[in-house]
């Protein structure tokens, strides 16, 4: 329940940002919204898709497709500098046991829009 509320607030913000960009470009409709979501961002892709559909109602994005580009987690050890995959924010280095700091995987950004422009 808590997670769905989290994804709903994110979906609403995505639609608000997309609408602002689309209106600035003179759009009459948003067909597709592409977002980047990192594996460590704490966002469930399926929940975000469901919430996005609801958040789009009565907006320029109603009926728009949500494309999610998922970014895998990557970390670097603060002690030895070893880099490797990171599945969670708090992880230990497999080489030396030091703490891994995230380099990639925390992204959450609007990448692109596909719009229909106003005619005339």
Image (cartoon, grey):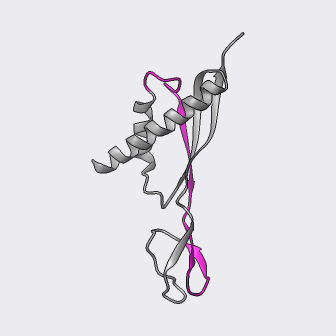
Classify the position of the C terminus by image quarter. Answer: top right
Which portion, as a residue range, is magenta?
Answer: 57-85
Farthest residue toward the bottom?
Answer: 96
Residue depicted at 46% across the width and 29% down the height: 56
> Would residue 27 be found to the left or right of residue 59 on screen?
right
* Residue 108 versus residue 66 in the image, above or below: below
Q: Position of residue 73 (x, y in %)?
A: 54, 65
Kindly give the residue lying farthest to the left in the view shown.
1
The x and y percentages for residue 82 are: 61, 82
Residue plotted at (54% across, 61% down): 105
Taking the view exactly as shown, the residue that stands out farthest to the right is 120
Indicate the position of residue 101 as horizontal and vertical percent values: 53, 74
Does the segment drawn in magenta span residue 59? yes
Residue shown at the point (56%, 62%) measured from the top left: 72
Asked whether 67 falls inside the magenta stretch, the response is: yes
Above or below 90: residue 79: below
Examine the rendered structure and indicate whether residue 83 appears above or below residue 110.
Answer: below
* Position in image of residue 42 (x %, y %): 43, 57
Q: Nearer the viewer, residue 20 or 90?
A: 20
Looking at the image, residue 3 sits to the left or right of residue 107; the answer is left
Q: Nearer the viewer, residue 33 or 79?
A: 79
Q: Is residue 62 left or right of residue 31?
A: left
Total marks placed = 0
Q: Residue furthest top?
A: 120
Q: Nearer the viewer, residue 108 or 54?
A: 108
The residue under the point 55% across, 29% down is 19
């Amino acid at each position: 329940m808590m997670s769905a509320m989290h994804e709903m607030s994110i979906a609403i913000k995505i639609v608000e940002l997309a609408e602002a960009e689309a209106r600035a470009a003179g759009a009459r409709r948003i067909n597709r919204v592409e977002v980047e979501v990192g594996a460590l961002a704490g966002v469930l892709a399926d929940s975000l898709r469901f919430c996005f559909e609801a958040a789009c109602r009565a907006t320029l994005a109603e009926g728009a497709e949500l494309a999610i580009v998922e970014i895998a987690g990557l970390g670097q050890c603060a002690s030895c500098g070893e880099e490797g995959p990171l599945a969670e924010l708090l992880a230990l280095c497999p080489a030396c046991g030091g703490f891994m700091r995230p380099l990639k995987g925390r992204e959450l950004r609007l990448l692109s829009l596909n719009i229909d422009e106003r005619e005339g």
